[in-house]
Image: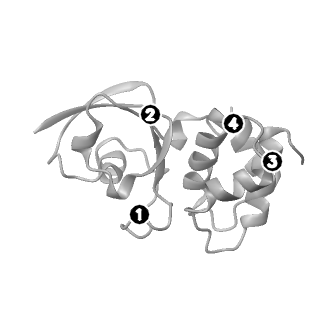
């Protein structure tokens, strides 16, 4: 079945089973490899993208649920040459250790900053709770989000 979806502002027609998880379509059909396969159960956040501005686990989101909706991936935020303010803050704070979770962390954080540009520490912590960093850089990640929001460096 052919499904049309909008990813990073561009419309794509893909011929896949509508039950296919978005993560597989992003990586295998569209060549967008920022979102990573972590657990496949929506429990770690490595696959986090934004759907209509909300953070979502792409590993458990079937393609059929995306008709007429907008998907944003980390590739839609910026490039290595022109990073978004949040990506720059993650780099400045050296928030990545192995880097596996970082795209998902950035996408969840961006979803928060898009609706609340100056979140409190408690709001940041609560919002970021579903995403896990196995390397333990959570404190750097929190600093990066605060830096990007301008609430502190």
Residue density around tag 3, few if under 14, some if 14–19, many if 20 or more, within 10 Å: many
Relative to residue 90, is residue 103 drawn left or right? Answer: left
**What residue lies at 78% left-to-right and 41% top-to-bottom?**
148
Q: Which structural element holds mark 2?
A: loop
Category of crowding for the residue at label 1, using alpha-carbon neighbours closer than 10 angstroms: few (below 14), some (14–19), many (at least 20): some
Sequence-first tag of 2 and 4: 2
Q: Considering the numbered disc 4 on the image, is that residue within a helix, a strand or a loop?
A: loop
Question: Cα distance, mark 1 to mark 2?
Answer: 18 Å
How far apart marks 1 and 3 lie (CA) works out to 25 Å
- The residue to which callout 3 is attached is 146
Q: Secondary structure at mark 1?
A: loop
Q: Return the residue nearer the eye: 45 or 117.
A: 117
Image quadrant for the N terminus? top left
Give the label on residue 42, or none: 1
Hey, which quadrant is residue 78 in on the image? top right
Q: CA distance from mark 3 to mark 4?
A: 12 Å
Q: Which residue is mark 4?
A: 116
Q: Which label's residue is closer to the chain start, 3 or 4?
A: 4
Q: Quadrant of residue 149?
A: top right
Mark 1 / mark 2, whichever is N-terminal: 1
Q: Residue at image x 50%, y 61%?
A: 45
- Sort mark 4 into few (<14), some (14-19) or many (20+) by Cα contacts within 10 Å: few
Q: Is residue 28 left or right of residue 47?
A: left
Please report the residue visible at 70 percent of the width from the left and 58 percent of the height from the top.
125
Q: Position of residue 14 (x, y in %)?
A: 21, 37
Closer to us: mark 2 or mark 4?
4
Give whichever of discs 4 and 1 has the lower sequence position.
Answer: 1
Contact (Cβ within 8 Å) of mark 1 with mark 2: no
The spot of residue 49 in percent (x, y) is 47, 46
* Residue named by callout 2: 52
């Amino acid at each position: 079945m052919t499904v049309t979806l909008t990813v990073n502002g561009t419309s794509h027609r893909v011929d896949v089973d509508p039950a296919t998880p978005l993560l597989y379509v992003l990586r295998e059909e569209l060549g967008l490899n920022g979102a990573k396969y972590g657990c496949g159960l929506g429990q770690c956040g490595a696959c986090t993208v934004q759907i209509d501005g909300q953070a979502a686990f792409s590993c458990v989101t079937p393609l059929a649920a995306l008709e007429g909706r907008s998907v944003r991936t980390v590739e839609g935020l910026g490039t290595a040459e022109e990073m978004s303010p949040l990506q720059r803050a993650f780099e400045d704070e050296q928030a990545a250790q192995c880097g596996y979770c970082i795209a998902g962390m950035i996408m969840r954080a961006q979803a928060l900053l898009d609706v609340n540009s100056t979140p409190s520490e408690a709001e940041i912590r609560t919002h970021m709770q579903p995403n896990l960093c196995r390397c333990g850089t959570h404190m750097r990640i929190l600093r990066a989000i605060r830096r990007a929001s301008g609430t502190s460096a």
